[in-house]
Image (tube, helix red, strand yellow):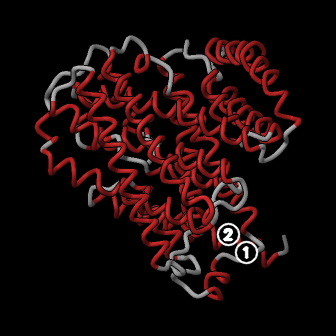
Amino acid sequence: MTGNAVSDFFLALTLAITAAKLLGAALRRIGQPAVVGEILAGILVSPMVLSATVSEKIFPESVQPVFSGLANVGLATFMFLVGYEMDGALLRGRKRIPLSIAVGSVVLPLAGGVALAIPLASTYAPESHTGFVLFVGVAMSVTAFPVLARILSDRELNRTATGAIVLVAAAIGDIVAWICLAGVIAFTGATGEWRFVLLPLYVLAMAFLVRPALKKTVQYAEHNDKQATVLFPVLIAGVLLSSAATEWLGIHFIFGAFAFGAIMPRAMSESLRVLVVNQMQQTGYLLLPLYFVVAGMKVDLAGFGGGVLLTLVLVITVAIVTKALGVYAAGRLAGADHGQALTASVLMNTRGLTEIVIVSVGLEMALIDQKFYSIMVVMAVVTTVLTGPLLKRIGAHRLVGANPPEGASAAAREKQNAPG
């Protein structure tokens, strides 16, 4: 990069971080997740709102690769935390209601998404029609676990039985969604077809080489009082290397970051566990908003005609209805009362952050085109924005004060600092 390019980069970075933080904070003040403001920041500086000339001056093409690279590092640290926090008391010893809700939240939206995508494939699939249909089904089934955790914490619903049930269900559903997405990417053979056969070796290496090495590193850090100086650089290097490995294998770097978090040993002191989470969160807190600014900049609604608007309405309707019906019916069948099932059906419609990541991967892997990407981003924002008002409408605040299942309250409180 030349001197001017470096200067442009720092100016663009300052503007993006400042705009994301300010709009994120503003949205939170009115009861919305910060990710909505971060996406809005990207939309406001995109060619759709500004002219192409002005947008190019703010974010010159020469700085965009480095900008996107930093955004991806922020996403990788976030995915590490998703993998790390999927384990623990929250996912153990749960009864049938959370599992049933998780199944309902995935199966019906996935089926609805597939049914909707079949007639749309000829219009919006850039390459494989089958890949498009499968991808839309997976994208419809997503629940944004981190954003959901933050919503529950902000409204003190994490201390209720319903909040704990929904957190467990969302965690299970997120795991299923990531596995399904990896399967779709592998099926379509987007990149590195021959390398994919090496995936079992990667899994074995992570389980039997990397995990024991991490365990020894954790023990060394605790016994030698070098927690910050030893462990954090190892974790950052490990996340980046694991991300590079899965990207090389052809299944996207987010799965490598997620896998590294999933194999991270949990047997450590509370002070070290807090240090690990806080340091990785601080990295993500700075860089992750850049990812959503970039995602917002890719949204283009300017060319939306009648057909695209009809598709948008259909996508939003199918997304909301199938998720709500699937969760409510599954909850009631498993023994949840009407209030629990209704509250869960509203909360599980939160898609926000996770949906944006998944549809961005779909665009990058040419599973969807630019127009359908914009449609899915709008759907993610709408379903997330509706969560707060709908919770008030159904009177979910009356659940506050109820006791959560044993062990779930502490686990839920650990999610208060989740991104979004």
Asked if labels 2 and 1 touch by Cβ distance under 8 angstroms, the answer is: yes
How many numbered badges does the structure rendering display?
2
In the image, taking residue 311 as reference, residue 165 lies left or right, namely: left
In the image, taking residue 290 as reference, residue 85 lies left or right, namely: left
Q: Amino acid at mark 2?
A: Phe
Along the line of sight, which residue is nearer the eye, 138 or 62? Answer: 138
Q: Quadrant of residue 95?
A: top left
Residue 38 versus residue 116 in the image, above or below? below
Picture residue at 63% right of the left edge, 62% below the top: 122
Give x and y (percent) for residue 319: 40, 51
Along the line of sight, which residue is nearer the eye, 312 or 43? Answer: 312
Judge the density around disc 2: few (<14), some (14-19), many (≥20) Cα neighbours within 10 Å. few
Question: Which residue is under mark 2?
Answer: 10
The Cα atoms of the two marked residues, 1 and 2, are separated by 5 Å
Q: Where the N terminus falls, by quadrant?
A: bottom right
User: Helix, strand, or loop for circle 2?
Assistant: helix
Q: Amino acid at mark 1?
A: Ser
Question: Which label number is shown at residue 170?
Answer: none
Q: Quadrant of residue 317?
A: bottom left
Picture residue at 36% right of the left edge, 53% below the top: 384
Residue 11 versus residue 286 in the image, above or below? below
Picture residue at 41% right of the left edge, 38% below the top: 108
Residue 370 versus residue 50 in the image, above or below? above
Question: Which residue is under mark 1?
Answer: 7
Picture residue at 85% right of the left edge, 39% below the top: 193
What is the residue that sits farthest to the front in this orientation? 119
User: Helix, strand, or loop for circle 1?
Assistant: helix
Give x and y (percent) for residue 414: 39, 29
